Image: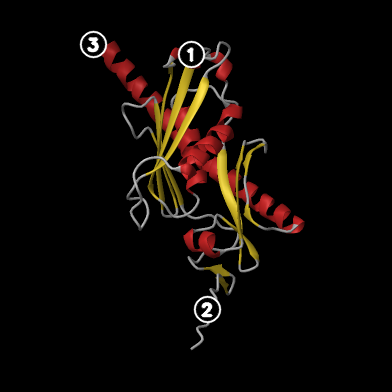
Amino acid sequence: MIFMEEKISFIKDGLRLDGRRPDELRPIKIEVGVLARADGSCYVEMGKNRVIAAVYGPREVHPRHLQEVTRAIVRYRYNMASFSVEERRRPGPDRRSYELSKVGREALEPVILTSYYPRSVIDVFVEILQADAGTRTAGINAASVALADAGIPMRGLISSCAAGKVGGEIVLDPMKEEDNFGDADMPIAMTPSGEITLLQMDGGLTIDEFHEAMELAKSGCRQIYEVQRKVLIERYSQLEGERGEQAEVTACD
């Protein structure tokens, strides 16, 4: 008996499996200041991804021999919770966690003004609570906002998004099924001015497809940046309002 593998139709009538257009992001939600004991924190939902980031520092480096005389060091820890995927994963770091910790740090470090805090460390912790493809980009987006929430001086926010190739077509922000069964995946991270701080690619793209995917991913980053910027403005407007109310109460007393 011969079994024929069923071909997955990723795009039908111009829409993807989840009803999005090829150039459309998944729904995104960002909350700032979600952890009271962290210096800065952020919660991000990108599609079905659920990610939380916490920033601690600048603070003293331990052990001290790791100190850099002229700048702060940045440590970025990416971790997937054991319950974040359908098949429960083994707790603790693995090879992929180490890789994504490295690329996350390298994506953010170029915009952090580390020379302001010599002999110190800035710790960034990213925890994936629920995974649905694109966790590295969601983690970077959360970490960038958490750094801003912590008051870490930066040249600008970092926004991250992926483009992929599925069913022969370039699409923005691939979801799980597209990531698993598609032809290529290309996550990037970008500053507001367009400087690329992360570029990776799994699979194969022609030169024309690469340029198309790059422009689409940049468009996604710009959209995400606007959301990041908006929630930070709202956060600090709220804090200023609370300080103003406290000042009025003090004056009345």
Where 174 falls versus 34 (above or below)? below
Of all residues, the one furthest to the front in this rendering is 1
Q: Is residue 123 left or right of residue 5?
A: left
* Image mark for residue 78: none
* Image mark for residue 65: 1
SS state under label 3: loop
Q: For the residue carrying disc 3, how many other residues have a C-alpha within 10 Å: few (<14), some (14-19), or many (20+)? A: few
Q: Earlier in the sequence, mark 2 or mark 3?
A: 2
Query: Which residue does the image show at 52% across and 78% down from the upper left?
Result: 5
Q: Position of residue 137 (x, y in %)?
A: 52, 45
Q: Is residue 50 left or right of residue 66?
A: left
Query: Which residue does the image show at 50% across and 44% down from the upper left?
Result: 136
Number of marks in picture: 3
Q: Is residue 76 left or right of residue 202?
A: left
Q: For the residue carrying disc 2, how many other residues have a C-alpha within 10 Å: few (<14), some (14-19), or many (20+)? A: few
SS state under label 1: helix
Q: Position of residue 26 (x, y in %)?
A: 49, 55
Where 170 falls versus 75 (above or below)? below
Q: Earlier in the sequence, mark 1 or mark 2?
A: 2
Q: CA distance from mark 2 to mark 3?
A: 76 Å
Q: CA distance from mark 3 to mark 1?
A: 50 Å
Which callout, 3 or 1, points to the residue nearer the camera? 1
Look at mark 2 in the image and give the residue it sits on.
5
Query: Picture quarter containing residue 127?
Result: top left
Q: Amino acid at mark 3?
A: Asp
* Image mark for residue 253: 3
Where 217 falls versus 41 (above or below)? below
Q: Of 81 and 236, which appears nearest the observer? A: 81
Q: Amino acid at mark 1?
A: His
Of all residues, the one furthest to the right in this rendering is 207
SS state under label 2: loop
Q: Position of residue 102 (x, y in %)?
A: 53, 35
